[in-house]
Image (tube, rainbow, N blue to C red):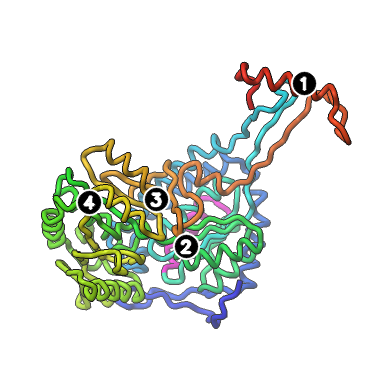
Amino acid sequence: MTTGIEHSPQIVVKDPVSGETVGTVTNHSAEEIGAAVDRARAAQPGWDARGSRGRARLLQLWGDELWRSRETIIQTIRRETGKNDTGALLEIIVLDNVIDYYAHHTPRLLRPQRRRTMFPIIQNARVYYKPYGVVGFITPWNYPYLNAYLDVIPALAAGNTAVLKPSEITPFTAQYAAACAYRAGIPQDVIQVITGDGQTGAALVDRVDYIAVTGSTATGRKVAVRAAERLIPYSLELGGKDPLIVLEDVDLDMAAATVLQGALENAGQVCVSTERVYVVETIYDHFVERLAHYAHQLNVGPGDGLDVHVGSMTNEREVRRCETQVADAISKGAQVIFGGRRRPELGPLFFEPTILVDVNHTMDVMREETFGPLVPVMRVSNAEEAVRLANDSQYGLSSAILTRDLKRGQRLARQLQAGDTSINRTQFVIGTPSLPSGGVKDSGIGRRNGPEGLMRFVRTQSILTDRLWIAKPILTQLDPTLFRLLKIQRVLRRWIPFLRL
């Protein structure tokens, strides 16, 4: 898998707020990637041999070390991304819960399972769970701590070793977290962080036993093609255009605050960010007024305190996308009632939280992923129209419904074409370790978190043992004794639960 891009030996990392250089990292070559994977493959049997409980204990020690180092991690996240302190702290809290979840539950989830057979008295069958080997991870810049290790944790718990390629925009957070793992006693070859550009990621796909990618849909398609060529398993956490439906029975103040939180976390640079809002027309005008009211109270600025609501965006490409989508919407009849422009006096990549009304599905802001602090609000006649429009998208990552009628909310949630839906909350599924999350349609393949997030990193081995050789090997015809037993078994399994498969 090649990119055709010239390979530079060093990558300069910039602070998006000040423009200052944070540092430089190596742009690793394909040969260096291969060597890292070889080291990980050599270390994997020893890591697996520790058993699920031994690995869980080391993961807990790693979690403790990360928690003790949280101030350094927050500072590193801020310098690389420009996000506020609250957003950086949130990454730490969520990953701490993920580590605790898998450290506690993995031994039970990976315990060999007994299965019934056609002849339960004379046969014994078990399913064993085995790691794939070396798992490669390609992760984005928007959550350089959480997204880097959210999937690494269950992969390690399952007995795999990990080679992580973080975004070249934000590599230092991932490197520091790996250093914490080494201090906690996890061998260095079990977790390796390799830095580089797109060529580095391509080389990683060519060498590992399993590849997990968090990124754009375009990147995911390329990885899927190469993984299919190599016949290796993969999982993809990709783009989204997440809808939020506001029903007529809501508390308007609570609903407005919830929408802003869902749309503006990390300046909207979240795969599960609220990017489309559908409001029932009977409350539309009042809701928009409350939304603008709360938007005026937002504190936008550098992320050096917990009182900052919206920090800097991380790269110029995303800022330009916001500008382009706002301009497209205005040209097609939308109105900006708040924000809509850069804030260069705060920093080169600050963009105001922006509320757009009179939007429709001909506009890019309602069709294409934004990844920025835009809040387009569309009027709908009823809940049914809201669901129809919410499903009118190539994406299906996350979604939300705001209503006081919880039964109605749950009924509507089941109609949404999304990997998960939150009722009266946004972005909370991804922060709940016990719940699987992941997309449908162009938003990805596979699930992270929950038992499903662990089991994707193991393969099954079924072992059946016949206690008695009661039948001859079948060559050209069915053994009469075996056939009589099969007929008896077919009748009995309808009436005796123990005999059912």
Give the percent coordinates (x, y) of residue 271: 38, 59
Relative side of 171 to 335, left or right: right
Q: Residue under label 3, please give it.
A: 417
Amino acid bearing label 1: Leu
Q: CA distance from mark 1 to mark 4?
A: 63 Å
In terms of secondary structure, where does tag 4 sit? helix
Give the percent coordinates (x, y) of residue 368: 35, 66
Q: Point out the tag, 3 or 1, that comes first from the N-terminus.
A: 3
Q: Residue at x 36, y 65 (%)?
A: 369
Q: Which residues are magenta?
A: 170-187
Q: Nearer the viewer, residue 224 or 202?
A: 224
Which disc number belongs to residue 139? 2
Q: Is the residue under label 4 in contact with that under label 3 (CB below 8 Å)?
A: no
Give the percent coordinates (x, y) of residue 22: 38, 74
Q: Residue under label 4, please give it.
A: 258
Amino acid bearing label 2: Thr
Q: Residue under label 1, please give it.
A: 485
Q: Is the residue under label 4 in contact with that under label 1 (CB below 8 Å)?
A: no
Q: Point out the tag, 2 or 4, that comes first from the N-terminus.
A: 2
